[in-house]
């Protein structure tokens, strides 16, 4: 008995209760497990995740009071979607990942069920009632024009060499051949077969800062000097650029409507949670 109590005490230190929502306890392990979701990078914002779980417990409490249920086939479909997206459709890989997390399949399935219930509750309580009016959408478009501009893009061509590649041969070839032909012959870049062409990109989405800085300095039709990076050398030719531009209301309509819906939904969600909190004991340790 003493040994069991000692073991329980150690377990409590490692995985203690971090919050109480009504008669439901939230364990530290529940929060830390959310910090490394399947197929995603770790989210290190512990406090944010804890608050999210508290909100979910409040909604699940409301769902139980409303006697909301979730059909088994809906849960099965969602698990199939997760398996397909994160594990290439291989259920064995899912089970292995659960085992690595020491998470029983039954607990995983319950978590999926609860996620679906939370989503359904929010839809029934808030989202299905949010319908922005034309005047609200016009105001959103007028007040936030920066949200509805196209992004500036450039088209560049790249020659990428590894350490030890013959840079002099590239320089010599460029004296008599066009950039694309030289790129196809010498470049180790993934777009070499296309003549090194990267079309209509935001450089920061593709290249390292040193390359982006050089692209920003170039005018259309200019080619950079060699850009030295550890293990690599870049040669970049700026082909053309498309500046940011304002989109018309009609072109941006779907994005305007989405932003209006999201902002209004967030307002109503906060009010709804405040009501749920008012009826529930909440304690964060």
Image (cartoon, rainbow, N blue to C red):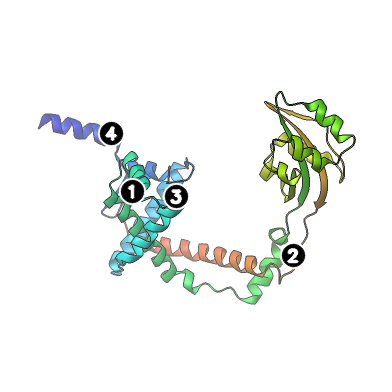
Left or right of 46 on screen, residue 57: left
Q: In this rendered view, identify the residue nearer to me: 117 or 215.
A: 215
Dot 1: what SS? strand
Quarter of the rendering occupied by the N terminus? top left
Alpha-carbon span between mark 1 and mark 4 = 18 Å
Alpha-carbon span between mark 3 and mark 2 = 36 Å
Marker disc for residue 86: 3
Q: Which residue is mark 4?
A: 13
Residue at coordinates 27% horizontally, 52% vertically from top-left?
106
Q: Earlier in the sequence, mark 1 or mark 4?
A: 4
Residue at coordinates 64% horizontally, 76% vertically from top-left?
134
Q: Which residue is mark 1?
A: 283
Which mark is in front, 3 or 4? 3
Question: As displayed, is residue 133 above or below residue 172?
Answer: below
Which mark is in front, 3 or 1? 3
Q: Earlier in the sequence, mark 2 or mark 4?
A: 4
Which mark is in front, 1 or 4? 4
**Cβ atoms under marks 3 and 1 closer than 8 Å:** no
């Amino acid at each position: 008995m003493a040994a069991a109590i000692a073991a329980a005490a150690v377990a409590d230190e490692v995985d203690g209760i971090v919050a109480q929502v009504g008669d439901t306890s939230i364990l530290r392990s529940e929060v830390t497990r959310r910090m490394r979701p399947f197929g995603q990078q770790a989210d290190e914002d512990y406090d944010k995740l804890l608050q999210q779980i508290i909100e979910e417990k409040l909604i699940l409490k409301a769902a139980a009071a409303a006697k909301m249920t979730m059909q088994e086939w809906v849960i099965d479909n969602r698990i199939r979607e997760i398996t397909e997206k994160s594990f290439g459709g291989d259920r064995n890989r899912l089970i292995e990942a659960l085992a690595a997390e020491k998470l029983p399949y039954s607990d995983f399935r319950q978590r999926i069920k609860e996620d679906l219930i939370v989503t359904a509750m929010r839809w029934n309580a808030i989202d299905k009632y949010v319908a922005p009016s034309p005047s609200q959408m016009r105001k959103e478009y007028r007040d936030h024009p920066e949200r509805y501009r196209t992004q500036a893009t450039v088209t560049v061509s790249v020659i990428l060499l590894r350490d030890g590649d013959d840079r002099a041969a590239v320089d010599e070839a460029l004296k008599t051949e066009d950039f694309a032909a030289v790129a196809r012959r010498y470049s180790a870049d993934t777009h070499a077969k296309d003549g090194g062409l990267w079309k209509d990109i935001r450089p920061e989405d593709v290249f390292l800062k040193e390359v982006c800085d050089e692209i920003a300095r170039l005018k259309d039709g200019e080619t950079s000097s060699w850009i030295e990076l550890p293990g690599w050398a870049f040669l970049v030719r700026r082909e053309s650029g498309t500046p940011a531009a304002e989109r018309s209301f009609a072109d941006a309509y779907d994005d305007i409507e989405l932003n209006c819906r999201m902002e209004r939904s967030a307002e109503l969600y906060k009010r709804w949670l405040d009501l749920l909190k008012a009826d529930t004991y909440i304690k964060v340790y």
